[in-house]
């Protein structure tokens, strides 16, 4: 029952015993350790995309508050640079999604 407790969503041995006696289903949770690297990479991509989004918002604010054309040109160029970073992250993301799709849809 200890092993079942460790693998399930039950919080105590008593809860495991009650579910067994009442013939309730016990939800067992298993961690696929082969996915750890992929999940870490997805987390990194998410954080990087969020940081890029914040930076683009700041650039947009600067562009909109700039009064002269040289200031607007500066913010425009910086935004273009950041959009290239987005492209890199989206390419990484699509590669990961493709590999996940192959793994989960294999027959």
Image: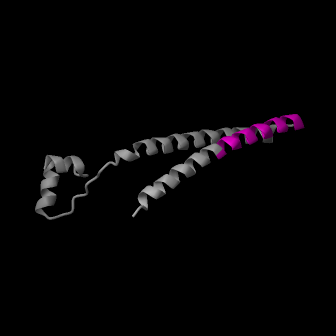
Above or below, 26 against 34 in this view is below
Q: Is residue 41 magenta?
A: no
Residue 15: image location, x then y, percent = 16, 53
x 47%, y 58%: residue: 101
Residue with the most extreme front position: 107
Q: Is residue 46 left or right of residue 58?
A: left
Above or below, 8 against 59 in this view is below
Residue 106: image location, x then y, percent = 41, 61
x 13%, y 57%: residue: 18
Residue 76: image location, x then y, percent = 79, 40
Determine the image quadrant of residue 49: top right
Nearest the viewer among 15 and 104 is 104
Q: Is residue 68 visible?
A: no
Region of the chain picked out in magenta, as a range: 69-87
Above or below, 94 against 63 in this view is below
Residue with the most extreme right position: 69
């Amino acid at each position: 029952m200890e092993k079942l407790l460790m693998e399930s969503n039950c919080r105590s041995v008593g809860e495991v015993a009650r579910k067994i006696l009442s013939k309730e289903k016990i939800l067992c949770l298993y961690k696929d350790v082969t996915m750890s690297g992929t999940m870490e990479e997805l987390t990194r991509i998410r954080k990087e995309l969020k940081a890029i989004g914040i930076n683009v918002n700041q650039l947009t604010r600067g562009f909109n508050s700039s009064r002269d054309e040289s200031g607007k040109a500066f913010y425009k160029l910086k935004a273009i640079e950041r959009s290239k970073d987005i492209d890199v992250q989206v390419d990484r993301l699509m590669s990961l999604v493709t590999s996940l799709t192959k793994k989960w849809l294999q027959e």
